[in-house]
Image: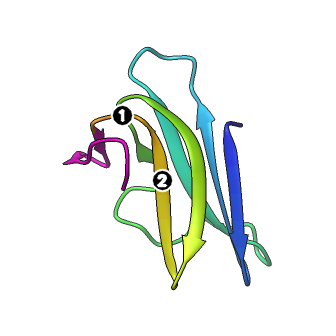
Amino acid sequence: MNAIAATGDRVYLSYSTGSPAGDRVAGFDATTGAFLPWKSNPLPVNGRVFALAVACGKLFVGGGFSSIGGTPRNHLA
């Protein structure tokens, strides 16, 4: 696991798959343990994730990547 963030009943974490393709970011319901209903959960990231933060009800992801979930994002999503 690279980073973790939590808010209310939601927990977010990033982890390495050991693949050169990059890391993953997943979100869970802390009560049930079920994946959150994202389009793709866990989200593929084409590089490393170093930080997760939750602010104003949104998840922010920082790291050495240029896309997350197939959407171009340079180092911050």
- Indicate the secondary structure of the residue bearing disc 1: loop
Magenta highlight range: 67-77
Quarter in which the C terminus is drawn = bottom left
Q: Quadrant of residue 65?
A: top left
The residue sitting at 52% across, 83% down in the picture is: 57
Quarter in which the N terminus is drawn = top right
Give the class, few, some or many, for how many residues have Cα within 10 Å of label 1's Cα (few <14, many ≥20): many
Measured along the vertical axis of the image, is residue 12 above or below residue 8?
above
The residue sitting at 41% across, 67% down in the picture is: 38
- List the single residue furthest toward the left: 72
**Badge 2 is on which residue?**
61
Location of residue 49 in the rendering, given as x and y in whole percent from the top left corner: 52, 38
- List the single residue furthest toward the right: 31
**Badge 1 is on which residue?**
65
Left or right, residue 16 beside residue 43: right
State the colouring used for the structure image: rainbow
